[in-house]
Amino acid sequence: MEKLCPECGEKIIGRVDKKFCSDYCRNSFNNKLNKDSKNLIRNINNRLRKNHRILESFPLKEGKTKTTRYKLLDKGFDFEIFTSIYTTKKGTIYYFVYDLGYLPLDNDYYMIVKRE
């Protein structure tokens, strides 16, 4: 019995359990299948990675540093995208992007910290 490639319709030659005629067809089929359902997640992950890279670009001294809101925004930082919030016993709120966090200070300053 001949099996046909679900992507291009070509005859499949090779192993009995082979589903696609080539790697190109396999990749194309799976990309189409996952395109819509994964698009939102992919976009959010890209924004999280960008925020992390921006926080990482500031050199830390003893696990922390200070910067301004303007410098973060200038690099493209999105303050609405973060992975977790940490509240200290005193009520101070840190916003984390994976292992790097920021604490809003007075006069549009931010302290960037690394979680150990």
Image (cartoon, rainbow, N blue to C red):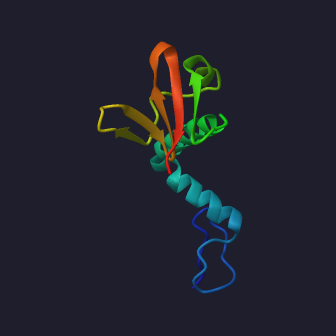
Q: Is residue 13 visible?
A: yes
Quarter of the image with the N terminus is: bottom right
| Viewer-closest of 40 and 85 | 85
Horizontal side of residue 87 vs 47, given as left or right: left
Is there any visible trace of residue 8 in the rendered image?
Answer: no
Residue 27 x, y percent position in the rendering? 64, 61
11 and 115: which one is in front?
115
Q: Residue at x 58, y 21 (%)?
A: 73
Please tell me whether residue 41 is drawn above or below residue 54 in the rendered image: below
Front-lying residue, 5 or 60: 60
How many marks on residues? Answer: 0
Query: Which is more toward the observer, 23 or 108?
Result: 108
Provide residue 95's location: percent of width, then percent of height.
43, 35
Q: Residue at x 57, y 66 (%)?
A: 6
Q: Position of residue 76 (x, y in %)?
A: 61, 26
Drawn side of residue 106 relative to residue 46, left or right: left
**Which image quarter: residue 7?**
bottom right
Q: Is residue 51 above or below residue 33?
A: above
Looking at the image, the residue that sits furthest to the front is 62
x, y (%) of residue 37?
A: 45, 49
The extreme top residue here reads 107
Which residue is pictured at 46% across the width and 40% down the height? 96
